[in-house]
Amino acid sequence: MLWNDDALQQVYRKFDELVAAYEGADLTDYNLRRIGSDLEQFVRALLQAGQVSYNLNSRVRNYSLGLPRLEDDGSSSNHLAIK
């Protein structure tokens, strides 16, 4: 993924918020997985909003948060540009 500093700071704040929500509770396996799952959903939302993007020049492509968005570049009737 390609990250900018603002997006990283948002993820750090969200993580702190999620951990703080469990203050005083036991850090059970369930609670830790819940924090991870909620954080994953937050990162997916950043990706869908275009605040972070996949690094399409990476040797390894992992689209576990969804396929890259495509847009019509207008140059051909059957060609889509990866955004």
Image: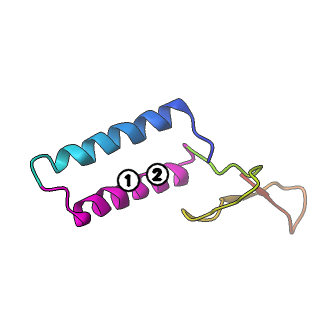
Determine contact: label 1, label 2, CB under 8 Å: yes
Q: Tell whether 49 sits left or right of 34.
A: right
Corner quadrant of residue 51: top right
The residue that disc 1 covers is 39
Q: Main secondary structure of the magenta part?
A: helix
Identify the element where label 1 is drawn: helix
**Residue at the location (57% across, 45% down)?**
52
Colour scheme: rainbow
| For residue 78, side relative to residue 9 (left or right) | right
Q: Position of residue 44 (x, y in %)?
A: 48, 56
Q: What residue type is disc 2 on?
A: Val
25 on left or right of 5: left
Residue appearing at x 29%, y 40% in the figure: 16
- The residue at 25%/64% (across/down) is 29
Amino acid residing under circle 1: Leu
Magenta-drawn stretch contains 27: yes
Q: Is residue 17 left or right of residue 52?
A: left
Magenta range is: 26-51
Res. 32 image quadrant: bottom left
Outermost residue on the right side: it is 76
Height in image: 51 above or below 54? Answer: above
| Percent coordinates x, y for residue 61 in the rendering | 70, 60
Q: x%, y% of residue 49? A: 52, 49
- The relative height of residue 15 versus residue 64 in the rendered view (above or below) is above
Please tell me which residue is depicted at 58% across the width and 39% down the height of the picture.
Answer: 3
Tag 2's secondary structure?
Answer: helix
**Res 43 label:** 2
Q: CA distance from mark 1 to mark 2?
A: 6 Å
- In this view, the residue farthest toward the top is 5
47 in magenta: yes
